[in-house]
Image: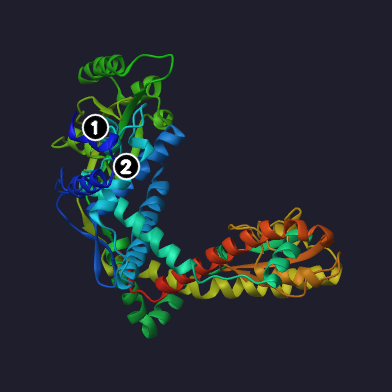
Amino acid sequence: MSVLEQMRSGSDSTGMQFMMALVVLSFVGWYAMPTGDMTNVVAEVNGEKIMGTEWGRLYRQTERRQEVMRGGTLSDQEQKLLGETVKQTLADQAVLLQQADRLGIFVSDTEVAWQIFKDPSFQDQDGEFSEDLFERTLKYGQYTRDDFEGRLRDDIVRRRLMSLISMGATVSSADVERTYRDAETKINLSYVRVRPSVFRDDVTLSDDERAAWLVENEAEAREVYDTDLTRVYSHPRQVQLSMIRLTETPDGPAIDELKASLTQLREQLVEGADFAAMAREHSKDSTATNGGDLGMRAEQQLMSEVLGAIEGLEDGGLSRVITVDGTEARLYKVVQRKAAYVDAFEDVRDDIVTQIVREERLPELAAAFAESEVLAAWARDGEAPSELLEGKSLAVLQTGSIGLGGSFGYSAPPEDMLAAAADAEPGSVLADVYEKDGEYWVGALDTRSEPDMGAFEDKREMLTEQTLAMKRQALWQSWVDDAKANADIRIY
C-alpha cells in the first residue's frame, strides 16, 4: 500500500493525522516553478509594487474566460476596460492582504495544501485526490504551482479577514423589525437619472480660452500628465493581428481534424490566398465579418501561445497553427507592429485641459439641470417634462414594486430617496434632488403599500439571521472602503 493510500485509509487515527500533516506541509514546495521576469510596474499600494507579469497573467486568464463565455474575442474598448479593471482588482486585493498582515492573520503551508487535497474539484470518482485533475486545472488556468498556491493562500487570508471584521456586527429587535418593515413596505417610483456625461458637448473651449486657462493652470495640466504618464500616455509595444479560429462542437470535427484543416488553409495563404476572405468564409470567431481583424493590441495582453506563435514574424507573416485549451485551432497573420512610444506633453496638452475643465463643469451642469429644470417643471406641472428630457436623451423610468430597503446594484435608487418615499404622499413629487455615484435622481412616488405586521413574529428568527448577514456585509464593505481610502493607491 502506498503512503498516499495509507494516509487516506488511516487518516482518522492520531498517528496518520500527524503523518498527513507532515506530507501536506511539504506538498506546497513540491513543484515550485519560477513565475517569470518582472518587467514593469502597473500599480503601487503603499509602496508595494504590482508587476506587469502579475497583471498580464490575470488579464489573460480573465480575457480567456470571457471569450469562452461569449464565443468570440473582446473588442478594443472591452480590452481597455478589462485591463483597467484588472489593475484595480489587484490593487484592492493588495490593500486587504496588507491589512491582514498588519492584523497578524496567517495561513500556513499545511492549510493551503490541505485545502487543495480535499477540494472536490481535484477528486476522482472515488473521492480521492487526483494529480491529473489538479495538473489539468493548472494548465487551463495558466498557473504554476506557486501561482495557484499563492492565490489560494491569499483567498483564505481574505476570507479570514472578512470573518474577523464581520464579527463586530450585532442586531437588536428594533433592527429586525425595521428590516421587516423596509422589505415589506412596497413602493413604486417614477424617476429620472441625470448623468453628467450627457452635458459633455455643452463644455467647449476656444483656443483663446484654453490658452488663458493654461497661463494660470499649466502646472495642474502637467501634474495630470505626470500622474497618467505610465497608464495613459506611455504605449507599450503593440501588434495588429488577424485570426482564423476553428472550434470543436459536439457534433463536429475533433481538434486534430480542425488543426489539419487549418494547416491546409495556411498552405493556401502561403500561395497567395486572401486572409480576410478566408477568415470571412471559415473562421468561427465574431471577428470573421471583419476579415479576422483583431485590431491593435499590446503584446503583454496576448496569451503566451499567441506570443510564441508570432515571435520573429515581420508584417504580413503567418504564424504556425496553434491549439488553445485543446478545443480550438488558431492561425494568425501579423498585420503590423508598432514600437513602444510616449505621447509628449505638448501633443496632449489641449486634450488634458479640456478633460480638466469638463470634469469641473459637468457635475455642476447636471446638478443645476436636475434641480432648476427637471424638478422645478415636474413639481409645477405634476408630470415629468418629457420634451426637456428627450433633448438630453433622458427618459422617465420606473422602479417597479420594490421594498424600502432597496436592492443592491447600480440601478438601485439612492438611500435618501427611498427614505423620502417612506413619508411622501402617493402621487407626489419628491422634494429634493438625490445624488448617487455622481448621478442626480429626481422622482415621484407612484404607490406605496404598508406591511402586514401580523406576519412579523412568524418570520422573526429568519429575519434575525438575514439582518445579521446584511449588517455583517455592510460592516465589511464599510471597512474595506475605509482601508482603500486610507491607502496610497497608484494605478499606472
What residue is at 65 percent from the left and 72 percent from the top?
Answer: 172
Label 2: state its secondary structure: loop
The residue that label 1 is drawn on is 5
Q: Is residue 466 left or right of residue 442?
A: left
The residue that label 2 is drawn on is 12
3D distance between C-alphas at marks 1 and 2: 13 Å
Asked whether 246 or 271 is in front, the reply is: 246
Asked whether 9 or 202 is in front, the reply is: 9
Nearer the observer, disc 1 or disc 2? 2
- Amino acid at circle 1: Glu
Residue 107 visible here: yes
Q: Which callout, 1 or 2, points at the residue further toward the start of the chain?
A: 1
Q: Position of residue 279 (x, y in %)?
A: 36, 24
Label 1: state its secondary structure: helix
Q: Is residue 391 left or right of residue 489?
A: right
Asked whether 180 or 367 is in front, the reply is: 180
Quadrant the N terminus occupies: top left
Quadrant the C terminus occupies: bottom left
Neighbour class for label 2 at 10 Å: few (<14), some, many (≥20)? few
Q: Position of residue 396 (x, y in %)?
A: 73, 57
The numbered mark at residue 258 is: none
Asked whether 166 or 417 is in front, the reply is: 166
What residue is at 79 percent from the left and 65 percent from the top?
Answer: 444
Q: Is residue 426 left or right of residue 27?
A: right
Residue 227 sits in quarter? bottom left
Q: Position of residue 462 (x, y in %)?
A: 67, 56
- Amino acid at circle 2: Asp
What residue is at 81 percent from the left and 72 percent from the top?
Answer: 423
Residue at far bottom of view: 216
Depicted 339 relative to depicted 464: above or below: above
Residue 265 sits in quarter? top left
Q: Position of residue 356 (x, y in %)?
A: 44, 73
